[in-house]
Amino acid sequence: MKQIKAEIITIGDEILYGQIVDTNSQWICTHLDELGIKIVRKVTIGDIESHILNSFSAAEKEADLILITGGLGPTNDDLTKPCLAKYFNSKLVMHEEALAQLKGFFDKRGFELNDLNRKQAELPDNCTMIPNPLGTAAGMWFEKGGKVFISMPGVPHEMKNMMLEELLPRVREFFKPEEIIHKLIKTAGIGESWLAEKIEDWEKTLPEHIKLAYLPSPGIVKLRLTGSGKSAEVLENEIDAEIERLKPYAGKYIFGYNKDTLEEAIGEILKSRNQTLAVAESCTGGFLSHQITSIPGSSDYFKGGIIAYSNEIKVSQLGVLRDTIQKYGAVSEETVAEMANRVREKYNADIGIATSGIAGPGGGTPEKPVGTVWIAYADGEETHTRKLQLVQDRLVNIRYSTVGAATLAWKSLKQKIENGV
């Protein structure tokens, strides 16, 4: 079966100059992928006729489906519609159905339909009009040599409604694409290259129609299995079977699948063990608590936390010994271990997690450069610590430290279960 290829063309100076962020393309890509259509290129161009026409021509050579957003307004700088008319050797004519919908849209809101707005009901005479109940710019569908051009408004909620209600069903019926199934396997506590080495033998034996991709992010490596074929049900079963084969190689690093998060995995373990959690944060500044509390139902196990950013708060509010900080420093194994134990005691929680580090860009020393972070886990019986040596970027360090602390907690809790404790 032929792989259907698509290209997305985004039109508008405001997007090209970065004044508006293009969220449409990402949304379109996700939904086309679910249909089994492969995105081969995304292009953003300004409001220049020659550039628009050239982009249409280039897209037609590469793709079967060309989706265009933006440039459908009533003013002279909106060039998409006249460019489409020129490209398809057609002329703009008043489309009675589009005009009736436009009148209804304005009447419902008590506005007068002026001549400039009426022009939005003029469409190329060889297109199929796509209704837009949420706005004034109709969509357009063109067919040429087995290929399809679709023009949609750039306003996100208008585009999404048009895609969901009208265009995705039409695209599926027109192209009849093969099924594509993705499944994400989420791992923590191991880097991409080490993971790749561990699963190399498993990867070599994957069937030809199931592909593997590595998707690393701060502290987490996602493995994406993608299967293509005629039956979604068969693909789902085949991918699940491959995941079972993967577990002997990397099972101890897998914390979830698809939309699962590390914080959810921790929460599920805590609920199953009827345990509670408290956190003490320094360099992460509350981001770890934010991640934990972003999970619905986290109040079942999360007691609270303290942002002990200064040494004084570490001592007076958290209970870290002043001598510990003076002897070893705020960013040290000894201090972060005390932080985890003291916050657990302070909030009467079963588990304590702590972070302390030099996020940057300043504050580093030769002994403790920017990016030096200590994290700790404590449960009253054991205290586990880990040193992270990160980078110069403050926000990256905060995120990595948060994931590192969550990973340490997850691994420690998982080890308890495996040991029957």
Image (spheres, helix red, strand yellow):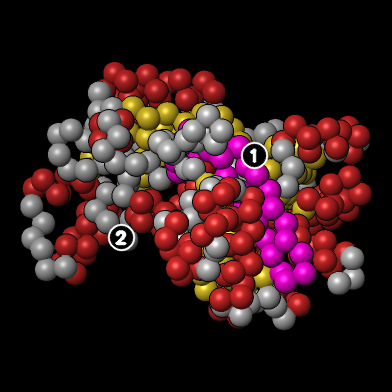
Q: Is residue 141 above or below residue 113?
A: above
Q: Position of residue 361 (x, y in %)?
A: 41, 36
Q: State the SS at label 1.
A: strand
Q: Is residue 60 above or below residue 134?
A: above
- Residue 174 visible, this angle: no
How packed mark 1 is, by other alpha carbons closer than 10 Å (few <14, some 14-19, many 20 or more), is: some
Q: Which residue is mark 2?
A: 134
Whether 382 is drawn above or below 138: the answer is: below
Q: Where is residue 146, by image quadrant? A: top right
Query: Where residue 370 sits in the image (x, y, percent)?
Result: 50, 35
Q: Residue at x 49, y 33 (%)?
A: 365
Cα distance in 3D space between marks 1 and 2: 38 Å
Q: Is residue 379 magenta?
A: yes
As rendered, which of 363 and 324 lies closer to the eye? 324
Q: Which residues are magenta?
A: 371-396
Q: Which residue is mark 1?
A: 216
Type of the residue with mark 1: Pro
Q: How many marks?
A: 2
First reached walking from the N terminus: tag 1 or tag 2:
2
Q: Residues within 10 Å of mark 2 (few under 14, many from 20)?
A: some
Name the kind of residue labelled 2 in the image. Leu
Residue 408 pos. (x, y %): 69, 55
In the rendered structure, the answer to whether residue 272 lies left or right of residue 171 reads: right
Residue 409 in percent (x, y) is at 69, 60
Indicate yes or no whether the magenta region holds residue 372: yes
Image disc number at residue 233: none
Q: Secondary structure at mark 2?
A: loop
- Determine the image quadrant of residue 382: bottom right
